[in-house]
């Protein structure tokens, strides 16, 4: 795992290695779940693993914010482990969604991020905002498609 960590530090643009490293950080836990302690692991060690993974992804996004799959991985990771974000977890996740939409929202593969955002807002019972997101996502992706078709 140390070698993979060094690769990620030297090449933060490589989403494949980064995703593998993140998975290894949470590996060894039942179902890859940080909420379930692995043998001999306490809550502080699980939180440290979460913070390390978050730091690695944020560092990579600082250099390469245009990779849809990296944003997708990060958003899924945050939602799966939101208990480590504290009391304002929902607000923090929403801010990351907003950053993702600004960075890659018009990308042709960004549909999964839009869908995750709509599902997230729906789970928070923000139905009006969910409907607005649905409309904006369809319009954004269609407008980008029309622009690409005219080139």
Image: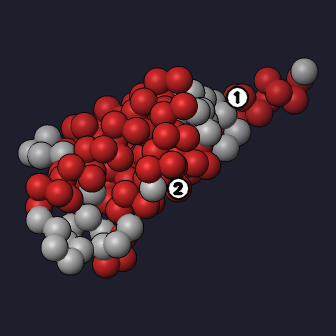
> Residue 81 location, x and y as percent?
27, 57
For image coordinates 49% across by 40% down, the residue present is: 6
Position of 40 relative to 44 (above/below): below
Closest to the observer, 134 or 46: 46
The image shows residue 147, relative to residue 36, as above or below, that is: above
Residue linked to disc 1:
143
Quote the CA–CA distance across marks 2 and 1.
34 Å
Residue tagged by mark 2? 20
In the displayed structure, 117 sits above or below 40; it is above
Q: State which quarter of the image contains the N terminus.
A: bottom left
- Count numbered badges in the picture: 2
The extreme right residue here reads: 151
Query: Coloured how?
Result: secondary structure
Q: Position of residue 50 (x, y in %)?
A: 27, 51
Q: Quadrant of the C terminus?
A: top right
Q: Please state if 10 lies on the left or on the right of 40 as rendered.
A: right
Badge 2 vs badge 1, beta-carbon distance below 8 Å: no
Looking at this view, is 85 or 56 the one in front? Answer: 56
Secondary structure beneath label 1: helix
Q: Nearer the viewer, residue 132 or 69?
A: 69
Query: Which residue is found at the position 36% from the left and 76% from the top?
Result: 31
The answer to whether residue 105 is above or below residue 77 is above
- Residue 66 position within the rendered picture, expressed as x and y whole percent measured from the top left: 60, 29
Q: Residue at x 66, y 34 (%)?
A: 107
Q: Dot 2: within a 10 Å radius of its alpha carbon, few (fewer than 14), some, or many (20 or more) residues?
A: some
Please state if 98 lies on the left or on the right of 93 as rendered. right
Mark 2 vs 1, N-terminal side: 2
Q: Residue furthest front?
A: 3
In terms of secondary structure, where does tag 2 sit? helix
Mark 1, Cα crowd under 10 Å, few <14 / some 14-19 / many 20+, is few
**Residue 43 visible here:** yes
């Amino acid at each position: 795992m140390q070698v993979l960590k060094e690769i990620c530090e030297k090449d933060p643009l490589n989403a494949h290695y980064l995703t593998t490293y993140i998975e290894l950080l949470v590996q060894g836990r039942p179902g890859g779940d940080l909420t379930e302690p692995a043998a001999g692991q306490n809550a502080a060690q699980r939180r440290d693993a979460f913070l390390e993974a978050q730091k690695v992804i944020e560092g990579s996004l600082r250099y390469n914010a245009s990779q849809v799959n990296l944003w997708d991985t990060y958003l899924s990771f945050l939602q799966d482990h939101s208990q480590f974000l504290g009391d304002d977890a929902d607000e923090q996740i929403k801010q990351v969604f907003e950053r993702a939409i600004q960075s890659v929202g018009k990308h042709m593969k960004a549909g999964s991020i839009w869908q995750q955002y709509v599902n997230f807002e729906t789970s928070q019972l923000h139905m009006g905002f969910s409907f607005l997101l649905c409309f904006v996502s369809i319009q954004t992706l269609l407008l980008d498609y029309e622009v690409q078709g005219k080139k």
